Image (cartoon, coloured by chain):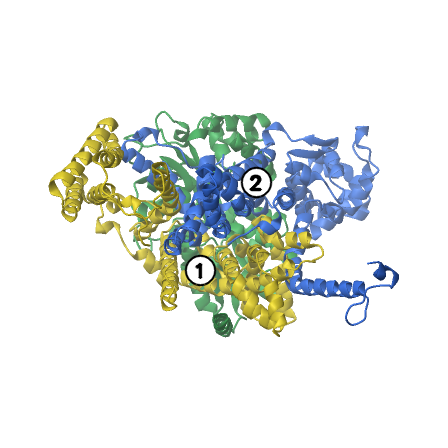
Chain colours: A yellow, B green, C blue
Amino acid sequence: MAALTPISRKPFWLVALMVGGFGAFFGLFIGTSNGSGITGAIVGAALMVGLAWAYINLLKNEPVGRGITFAAFGIAGFAAGGLPTAILGALIGALGGWLIYWAYEGRYRAYLAPYLTWQQVLWHFGFRTICGVIFVFLITPILVVLPLSFNAQNFFTFTPEMLRFDPAGYSLKHYQDFFSNNEWQRSFKNSLIIAPIATIISVTLGTLAAIGLSQSHVPGRRAIMAILISPMIVPLIISATGMFFFYSQIGNWMEGSLGLDKNLVGYIKVVLAHAVLGIPFVIITVTATLVGFDRSLTRAAANMGADPVTTFFRVQMPLILPGVISGGLFAFITSFDEVVVVLFVGSASQKTLPWQMFTGLREQISPTILAVATILVVISIALLTTLEFLRRRSERLRGMSPS
Amino acid sequence: MKFTKTLMATTALTMVAGVAGAADMADEMTIVSWGGAYTASQMNAYHKPYMEKTGVNIISDDSSAEAVAKLRAMNEANNITWDVVDVVASDAMRLCDEGLALEIDPDTMLADAPDGTKASEDFGDLLVSECFIPQIVYSTTFGYRTDMVGDKAPTTVCDIFDLATYPGKRSLQKRPIDNMEWALYCDGVAKDDIYDVLGTDAGVDRALAKLDTIKDQVVWWTAGAETPQLLADGEVVMGSTFNGRLFSAIAEQNQPIGMLWDMQSFDLDGWIIPAGLSPERQARALDYVYFATDTQRLADQAKYISYGPARKSSAPLVGKHADLGIDMAPHMPTDPANAANVHLYDYSWWADNRDDLDAKFQAWLAK
Amino acid sequence: MSDIKTNGPVLAADGTPLKRSLARALRVEKTRALMLIAPLLIFVLISFIIPIVSMLFRSVDNRIVEDTMPYTVAALKTWDASSGALPDEPVYAALARDMKAAAEKKEHTRIGGRLNYEESGFSSLFRKTGRAAKKFDLDSGEPFKAKLIDIHKDWGKIETWKIMQTHSVDYTNGYFLNAVDMKRTPDGAQMQDDDKRVLLKLFGRTMWMSLVITGMCILLGYPVAWILANLPARQANLLMILVLLPFWTSLLVRTSAWKVMLQQQGVINDVLVWLGFIADDSRLIIINNATGTIIAMTHILLPFMILPMYSVMQTIQPSYLRAAKSLGATNWTAFWRVYFPQSIPGIGAGSILVFILAIGYYITPEIVGGNKGVFISNRIAYHISTSLNWGLAAALGSILLAAVLILYWAYDKIVGIDNVKLG
């Protein structure tokens, strides 16, 4: 994104205000942990303001100034408490050094519209800070728990060895357990079989029904909608027992009359049960996308000689695809993360990953479930970044300016 | 679309392959148990030798926690997919009451002891229900953090209620069973009178009043793995759980935890066979149970987990831990040193009063 | 216009009257719409609605009593409970006959268990009587009254018979009464004993806490959705990963993660103590209570709020805001009068999703909720899987379902279900 506003150096009092606040904030933390918060805040603010003054008036060399702050804070941290505090100190130093020049050079103004008042600028950054805090809330529990998958012990506890970064406190044994244990492997495979098929069923049927529902004259629309959304509303444990009866009978019939294999029938039962649970998500997303759909497009297509099937795949589908995909995503997660229904409807050969995790948590707390979670998180980060990378690449190839 | 098709084709292929692999279903049985280390011990002590001996393929299903509900549903749907199920004694009684489990005649259906003692005598009063074949004796007992109790380790169960000497949280199971008895016992009721007192409204109030004294300091658990985790975290100073879990935390994980055996509550875990199996499946299930509950097999299980075998004749055969090589006998709840003062939990009393007391207990918890 | 009136119906191009032609077109359109809906509707009806309805039907079904003890139920109809006298010999004879038949089919314990939900003691009464009943000789003509009372003294108590009579109807309101802390007694519906009243409180708590969680999700979700919708796609997509990552992570893992974070020796408390904000002996209690449930469930359900909001906000043109400002609106007015109303469908969709999902949750409250943070679903799960009192579980489930349907209906009236947008 190109800069919107030419930037200019700011007066020292403004820089002092910003870096002083920064220093006071971290000083408060360090101060309270050593006895007096207020002293810490004052010392921190003074230190930062002093540094800023020195850099601006004496040093006048940005890379060196930032390097010095980074190194000095890191070393101070190491002196205070070893490796963990050294990392913390270096981070604060890097941030502080960057902040001094960011404030002094007025860089914060560069990407904002030139007409904004200072209150609006303040709100702009204040709002971003609030959002940052919420993102931290979203992601911290996951980041905190993932290192525990390297725990050398079989508990969800940060051992003193782990906190000291002692290699003896870490181990890959839970990953080894995941890859060598048949139960984990089998349940992982089962989840990979069941979730995609269930998703395909609920997306196909759900999209068709949503298109039907979006027509203008559907008798009993409200009631139909309520019925289709009901799997989301009924408490899962009730659904699980209720569905158990139905699927047992279906299973008996398929095994008895159709002569299907017991295992295959087991999979069909779980897949169908999960498909039902995923349907409300597909219905809700796709009908919502269809509300904004311009009906004249299908008429135009028909006018030009396309048959309904062609119209659907070539005109309607591409336009509602985002809704279908996000509905599919919800449906996939519903199946991939579902434990209550599969406990009832499934049998041992259809044990899915959440089921295995559930018994793992009940019967022996073992960080193997965290190892699995870590692997899944890494895979999904890889997938999402690949998608983003492909999107940018296609943008570039099509000669669009990056959005 | 292309992607979808490929995906469907692949999955279809995988499923076909799965079916082909499991072509021979004739000699297969599903055994339900708790999962984790417990199923592993059964796998080593019972399943593997049985599979070797008979060629039957055993599938293990970790559904014991839902066994009661699922068996009832299976029975109503007339689709019983389980052959042998591992449950605790109180669940076995409930299943027996509901007509969901097969009644067992120990003398004709179970193996005699090596010296010819009849099974009914060898199991003795552990045969608490007509449908239940006891397998192990376990106990719900207390563990404490050795580094958090100072130099005065707790010696009696009543130390749980002693907040002055042992400040900090304690964990108890979220159900009235055991907790009510311990509360009355520590409130001065003689051990033999506990159930008489508990049978009255005043007795229930008295037990709850005693529990009230520590209510703010209690973390309630529902799954057996929780207390060891809480102890390992130092989140609680003492807590009740199954003795095998404590053994594993102490001996296998080297946690600073000590055992408090006083007033441990004996309970039983064992097999039931679902009612309504086809004759040949029932015969096979009985054959398995005959094999898996004989004297040697029960003693073998103790090599892998610290629960006491349910047969008197198995006790002398208990050996050393399979991996750690330590002597297992002193870690059994039935060991005389540990069983100096035990609480015998009255199954039939609880079968009658469980619903009633549970409602009162829940109301008390919500207060 | 007058021409049409006098010259008969308007004709379509093919010569049929326009009215009929339009009606036919409408019919074709309706049929086509229904054809598209039909496969799914039939699938959901058969594989979900029917099983669920038959499950919920258990909340009134009490036929087990008459099916197992037909003679006793018939004989008891003539007994006047208010007479103060025990039933006569025919009732006891009928009981003996039923008991013997039930014991042979091994059904006596099941009905004992059913009646034990109402009054403790029935389970052992029936088990003991059934064991003896197998040896009864029904044709001997000996008096069963004395014999039964001899087997178990409860048969000599009027209370026992009153309860039997009260619960010998085919369809009962007993489970529903139990579900709202009342009970069906010989003297009509009465409040449950004080020390057993818990369910109404749990219903209230479930509703209240679900509302708090929904509110928290709106509060935290709105800014995030706004920033995602207003940043350039490159940055927004990267930040989106931060929203999707928790969403992809297993519910069980996230719940365990909150346990690690919130407990007294957990990460949050450790950090606060290390920083010196709280003393080591006054660590915050933020788990095993309502706070723990609210924090963990807000985190777990937040993506369900952010995603619908985001997709709605993406469609709001930024030019509207600029237009409002250029017409003299302050920042706040522009947001509140122009932007916010357009984002309401997103809030609505997110709220209904979060609220409905919240009331049905039971695994998370079970793990982090202690005793002050559990929901009604936890009791439903207990009655399904442990106490086997499925009638009560079904009654609780029906009430919960009815509450959700009323909310759904109200939502449809106020916002319109069409405005629900999920992604």
Q: Quick one: C195 or A7, which is closer to the camera?
A: A7
| Rendered position, A209 above or below C369 | below
Q: Along the horizontal axis of the image, is B176 left or right of B323?
A: right
Residues at discs 1 and 2 both on one chain: no
Q: Does residue B335 appear anywhere in the picture?
A: no
The residue pinned by badge 1 equals: B46
Between marks 1 and 2, how big is the CA–CA gap? 41 Å
Q: Does residue B168 appear anywhere in the picture?
A: yes
Which numbered marker is on residue B322? none
Amino acid type, callout 1: Tyr
Q: Quick one: C158 or C374, which is closer to the camera?
A: C374
The residue pinned by badge 2 equals: C376
SS for tag 2? helix
- Count neighbours of disc 1 (C-alpha within 10 A) and say few if under 14, some if 14 to 19, many if 20 or more: many
At 46% across and 44% down in the image, what residue appears? C221
- What is the x, y in percent for residue B156? 39, 31
- What is the x, y in percent for residue B100? 61, 53
